[in-house]
Amino acid sequence: MDSMETANLIALSMTAAVAIFAALLLLARDNMRRDQAIFLAGLLLLYAIFKTNDVVTMTGGYAGAPAFAVVTAPVRFLFGAAIFFYARAMTSPTPQWLRPRDALALVWPAAGMIAIIPFIMMSAQDKNSLMAEEFSSEEMREWFILTCKVIFALFLGSVFVYLGAAFRLLLRHTENVRQLFSNIE
């Protein structure tokens, strides 16, 4: 590992550690609204998991624990929803907890898990070969590329849906604040 890769590994590790530390600080504080703190802490923890995945990939950790990819794969689908839930909590005058319809956010990770079922069913040796991009056949290579494209499309779909909803929410909040402060009476 050269010095640039080492520096990158250190930066990724520090980023994950800082995100975890900030999340724990938010959860320990009593002087802010609990819903806002929990949603921001959740977002930071998702980010820490994502960065930990990068560290495991860089260090070759998947060779020892290829199932870790199955754990981290669905996390990326929750980023957009976490941003939306945090924005909703921040723009609401009253605490906003998860509602039953918010369970729809789990559709994206579930779709991602369905897409990687063949990977889950593989032996550890086959998983390691795929993670190293050493394909045993052309069909395996094509399946791997198709699965990566499907997962990326699902990720983009989830991000666009939830970031669009968060953006609409923030625009509506901005308009409400303008109306409130432009009314002199």
Image (cartoon, rainbow, N blue to C red):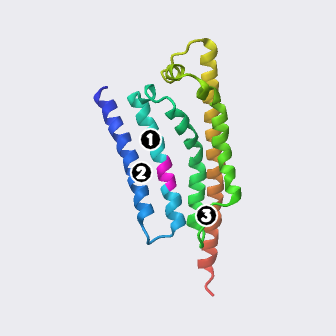
Image coords of residue 85 (percent x, y): 59, 58
Q: Tag 1: residue type?
A: Lys
- Residue under circle 2? 19
| Residues marked 1 and 2 touching at CB (< 8 Å) | yes
| Residues marked 3 and 2 touching at CB (< 8 Å) | no
Residue 179 highlighted magenta (yes or no) = no
Relative to 109, is 137 above or below?
Answer: above
Q: Marks 3 and 1, Cα distance to the nearest angstrom?
A: 27 Å
In the rendered structure, find residue 97 and report the number of the disc placed on it: 3
In this view, which residue lies farthest toward the left?
3
What secondary structure do most residues of the magenta stretch adopt? helix
User: Which residue is located at x 51 percent, y 16 percent?
Assistant: 134
**Mark 1: few, some, or many residues within 10 Å (few <14, many ≥20)?**
many
Give the residues in magenta: 42-46
Q: Nearer the viewer, residue 172 or 64?
A: 64
Relative to 172, is 59 above or below?
Answer: above
User: Which residue is located at x 48 percent, y 21 percent?
Assistant: 132
In the rendered structure, find residue 51 and report the number of the disc placed on it: 1
Q: Secondary structure at mark 1?
A: helix
